[in-house]
Image: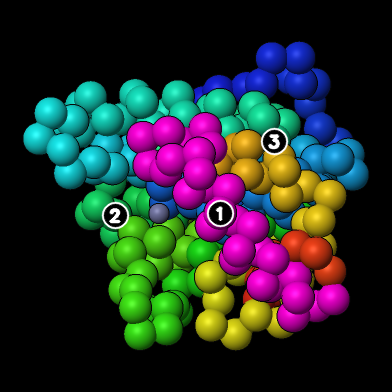
Amino acid sequence: MVTEHTQAGSAKPAAQGTYRMVIIAHPDDAEFTCAGTVARWIKEGLQVVYVVCTDGSRGSNEPNMPPQRMAPIRRAEQLEAAGILGVQSTIFLNHEDGTLQPTLELRRELTRLVRRFKPDTVICADPTRHFHRDEYVNHPDHRAAGEAALYAIFPSAVTRFVFPELLDEGLEPHKVRQIYLYGSPEPNTFVDISDTIELKIAALRAHRSQVTSEYAEARLRDWNGSLGRNHGVAFAEEFRRITLR
Ligand SMILES: [Zn+2]
C-alpha cells in the first residue's frame, strides 16, 4: 500500500518544473548519497519529493527486531530526515525490503509519480554499479530501484500509450530533463555541498536504527570531504548526469 506524507506548512502546490524527485530503495539511501544536493536545491527554492520503494523492514539482524517492528521505525526515521532537509513530500511504495525487483508494476508506480509531480530532474541509483572497489557488493534493491526509475523516466513517462491506464487517471506524458545517478562508477559531475554538509549529517543521524551519531558524522565528513578535495571544494557529492534530448 502506498503511503504519502507532506511536510506541515509546505503543502502549497509547486509550479511545474520546480519539483525534483529522488527515487531510492531504502529509508536512509538518500541521506547517505545525495542529501547534501537535496538540501542545496531546497535552499535554492526548489521543492523535492522523495519516493522510497521499500519499507526498510529488513534493516536489522537482531532477533528481537522482526520486519513488522522495524518498518514503522524506519518510516519515522525517514520522515524525520526529510523534515530536517525540508523535503516537501515523502511517498513510501512499501515493497518488501531485500527482495525488490525492477518489475513492470514498480515501473508503472514510478511512472505514475513522475507524470503526477512532473519533475524536471530525478535523482536515482546507477543500476550498473555491481561492486564498490573490492569491498562491497551493491545491494540488489539499489540496482532494482535505479533500473525501474530510469525506465519509468524513459520511455514510460514520455510515451503516451505505455501504461494507458495512467491516461484514465488524467496523467499526461511528462518529459524529465535530467537524471542524476548516484553511486555511479562513471561520475561526470559534482555538486558543492559545503554549505549543506551539516544538514546532511543531521539528516543521516535521524536513521538511528541504522547508524550511530558518531558514525554518521565521521562517514560523511570523510567521504564527502575526499570527494570535495577532488574538485577543490570542502565537501561534494558526485553523480553521473544524463541530460535527455
Ligand atoms: Zn540502501
Residues at discs 2 and 3 in contact (Cβ within 8 Å): no
| Circle 3 Cα neighbour tier, 10 Å, few/some/many (<14 / 14–19 / ≥20) | many
Q: Residue 218 carries which label?
A: 1
- Going from the N terminus, do you reach mark 2 or mark 1 first? 2
Q: Nearer the viewer, mark 2 or mark 3?
A: 3
Q: Please indicate whether residue 1 sits to the left or right of residue 39 in the image.
A: left
- Going from the N terminus, do you reach mark 2 or mark 3 first? 3
Q: Which residue is drawn at 46% across and 36% down?
A: 207
Whether 16 is among the magenta residues is: no
Disc 2 and disc 1: Cα gap in Å? 30 Å
Q: In which quarter of the image is ligand 1?
A: bottom left
Quadrant where the image shows the C terminus? bottom right
Callout 1: helix, strand or loop?
helix
Q: What stretch is highlighted in magenta?
A: 205-232
Q: Which mark is residue 109?
A: none
Disc 2 and disc 3: Cα gap in Å? 26 Å
Q: Residue at x 84, y 69 (%)?
A: 233
* Foreground residue among 176 and 47: 47
Position above or below: 177 against 3: below
> Horizontal and vertical percent for residue 105?
35, 51
Residues at discs 1 and 3 in contact (Cβ within 8 Å): no
Q: Nearer the viewer, mark 2 or mark 1?
A: 1
Residue type at mark 1 is: Ala
Whether 226 is among the magenta residues is: yes
| Circle 2 Cα neighbour tier, 10 Å, few/some/many (<14 / 14–19 / ≥20) | some
Q: Which residue is drawn at 36% across and 26% down?
A: 73
Seen as rendered, the residue at the extreme top is 9
* Foreground residue among 115 and 238: 238
Callout 3: helix, strand or loop?
helix
> Horizontal and vertical percent for residue 2?
41, 30
Residue type at mark 2 is: Leu
Give the labeled residue for mark 3: 85
